[in-house]
Image (cartoon, rainbow, N blue to C red):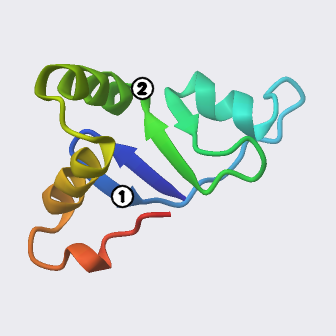
Amino acid sequence: MTVVHHNGIHKVNVAWCECVDSGDALEQLMLHGLFPSTLMNPQTVFTFVMLNQAHVHLLQSKKSLYDYMWALRRLTDNVFTSDVPVS
């Protein structure tokens, strides 16, 4: 799974809890502060911290979300930005 956080874009392995009261994948993600990019079979999630920071940056600087994501790619790997996972 790809996690987009305010300090960069990260690839992580996720193990879903299959306990009786654990809820589905969407509920588990939301309870851990992660917002999925899709509701069905999410492969990319955004942290609530990143979403809040993006909101403030976009309102203050008037830059596009595209530019914000490129900045996160640069934070992740400033030399090989094309190798940074995006989905």
Type of amino acid under label 2: Phe
User: Residue 50: horizontal and vertical position, in percent?
Assistant: 32, 32
Q: Is residue 17 above or below residue 22?
A: below
The Cα atoms of the two marked residues, 2 and 1, are separated by 15 Å
Q: Name the residue located 72 percent from the left edge and 28 percent from the top edge.
A: 27
Per the image, the residue denoted by label 2 is 48
The N terminus - image quarter:
bottom right
Q: Which mark is residue 44?
A: none
Using the image as rendered, state which of residue 9 and residue 18 is in the foreground: 9
- Crowd band around label 1 with a 10 angstrom C-alpha radius: few (<14), some (14–19), many (20+): some
Quick one: which residue is furthest to the right in this view? 20
Do the numbered discs 2 and 1 sit on residues whose CB atoms are within 8 Å? no
User: Residue 36: horizontal and vertical position, in percent?
Assistant: 59, 40
Q: Is residue 33 above or below residue 75?
A: above
The kind of secondary structure element at disc 2 is helix
Image quadrant where residue 7 sits: top left
The kind of secondary structure element at disc 1 is strand
Image quadrant where residue 60 sits: top left
User: Residue 22: horizontal and vertical position, in percent?
Assistant: 79, 28
Q: Name the residue located 21 percent from the left edge and 73 percent from the top edge.
A: 81
29 on left or right of 68: right
Image quadrant where residue 49 sits: top left
Q: Which mark is residue 10?
A: 1
Using the image as rendered, state which of residue 61 and residue 56 is in the foreground: 61
Type of amino acid under label 1: His
Using the image as rendered, state which of residue 44 and residue 70 is in the foreground: 70
Q: Earlier in the sequence, mark 2 or mark 1?
A: 1
Q: Name the residue located 82 percent from the left edge and 41 percent from the top edge.
A: 18
